[in-house]
Amino acid sequence: MTVIESATGRRTLPNRVAYALAAGVIGLGLFASVTPSPLYRTYSLLWHFSPLTLTLIYATYAFGVLAALLLAGGVSDQVGRRPVLLAALAGLMGSTVLFLLADSAAWLFVARGLQGLATGVALSAASASLLDLHPRRDPAGVGLTNATAAAAGLGLGILVSSSLVQIGWEPRVLPFAVLLGLFAAALAGAYLMPEPMRERSRLRLTLDRPHVPPVIRRPFVLAALAVLSSWSIGALFFSLGPQLAGELFQTTNVVVAGSGIVLLAATAVAAQLTTGRLAPWIATSLGSVGLAAGMVLIVAAAANGSSALYLAGSILGGAGFGAAFLGGLRALVSAMPPGSRASVLSAFYVVAYASLSVPAVLAGIVVTYVTLPATFEIFGSVVAAIALVVAFEAWRTRPAQRALRPMARREVLHDAAS
């Protein structure tokens, strides 16, 4: 790996390598978030806890992320990106060690809580670093990198963890041992990373309300609505999806049970690469319609016990997830003022992880009173309805472009194409 010497005499990675590292931290954070998922059934049988406890363990992670974003989301704007990334990766390594040592549900709560706290800090700092380190400061390129890294991390996390668990050799150890090695490599890379923040101040940890400057509130609302609908499907899939797939496929194979999540993430990445240069409102509108249609298929699959409909819904819903999430994020990134990047992205991820945690907890409560398929029918219908609202709201941003002078409109279309 090539390293260069900075102005301070410290040997650092080239900016392009550091940019890839920041994207890798985002992907690795999401990779780690789903690594325990294939083991939840094993944990529940081993330590005798209910589906509600399972969803609470899952939600503990999301609440940890929310706490980190509210307490430390803008810290990297103060003290710099590199020290925050180093601290976050060290925390993620600590949570992985807790998973390796876990011998009761209480350990899982602690491990997931620490993992959430560290992930919240890492996502905010790494996302802001992308725009700082991009060679052309291209918001569209940064948005695409951010979204694809997140979706790829989710899909690879489930696929790798499921495969390692299915191998059967130390299934409660091997996935976390691999994860620990990946974090160690990322930590070494972050140590060599150049610091993109030139002006830094002392650390101030205060409980701040998510702040979005008035000038970007409209794109923030669109991005928030898009992430609300798209990550709500993630809440269902990551907490209860493997159980539903196991029932539909009538199997205990964790790779098959996780197939819906893998397909969801894979098609999300494909959709993001396909729609990455469309105008954000177009991508968000089309993606939200696709997301709603995919959820309708998944609801039908749950009602009829159809594994084929479940896979089709995962593919269509994943494509919609990817396009809608990226479209909203691109509109937001392109409008962010430089001095508020970490804090705005923190506010964005607050919405994202609230969308992951609250539906997961509610689904865990509902599933104790009704069947698992009925729970998917209820929440899937709600997600589909929200997605259609997002499509409508994204479409409403279209007249603003039409109102521009012909020359200005051509410039906007040219920018979107580039």
Image (cartoon, rainbow, N blue to C red):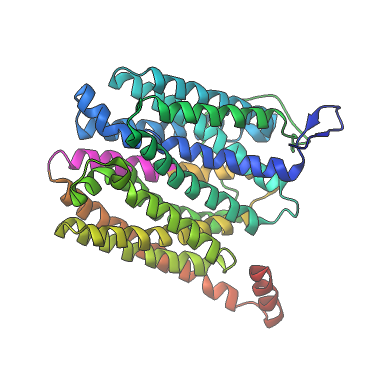
Q: Is residue 393 visible?
A: no
Image quarter where the N terminus lies is top right
Please, what is the dominant secondary structure of the magenta stretch?
helix
Q: Quarter of the image containing the C terminus?
A: bottom right
162 lies left or right of 412: left
> What is the number of callouts on the image?
0
Residue 10, visible in the rendered structure: yes
Q: With 374 as the anchor, is 76 left or right in this view?
A: right
Q: Residue at x 70, y 32 (%)?
A: 80
**x%, y% of residue 318?**
40, 58
The single residue placed furthest to the bottom in the displayed view is: 406
Stretch in magenta: 353-369
**Does 361 appear in magenta?**
yes
Nearer to us in this view, 369 or 185 = 185
Q: Where is residue 70 in the image (x, y as percent from the top left)?
A: 50, 33
Quadrant of the rendered image containing residue 356: top left
Give the camera-side residue of 351 and 44.
44
In-front residue for pair 199/122: 122
Q: In this view, does 159 lie above or below 85?
A: below
The location of residue 345, given as percent across then percent down, is 56, 44
**207 drawn magenta:** no
The residue shown at (29%, 33%) is 40
Q: Quadrant of residue 169?
A: top left
Q: Report the side of 172 relative to 90 (left or right).
A: left
In percent of the image, x 18 and y 48: which residue is there?
Answer: 250
Residue in the image at 77% along x and 37% along y: 2
Q: Is residue 164 above or below residue 177?
A: below
Q: In this view, does 44 lie above or below 34?
A: above
Image x and y of residue 413, in percent: 64, 74
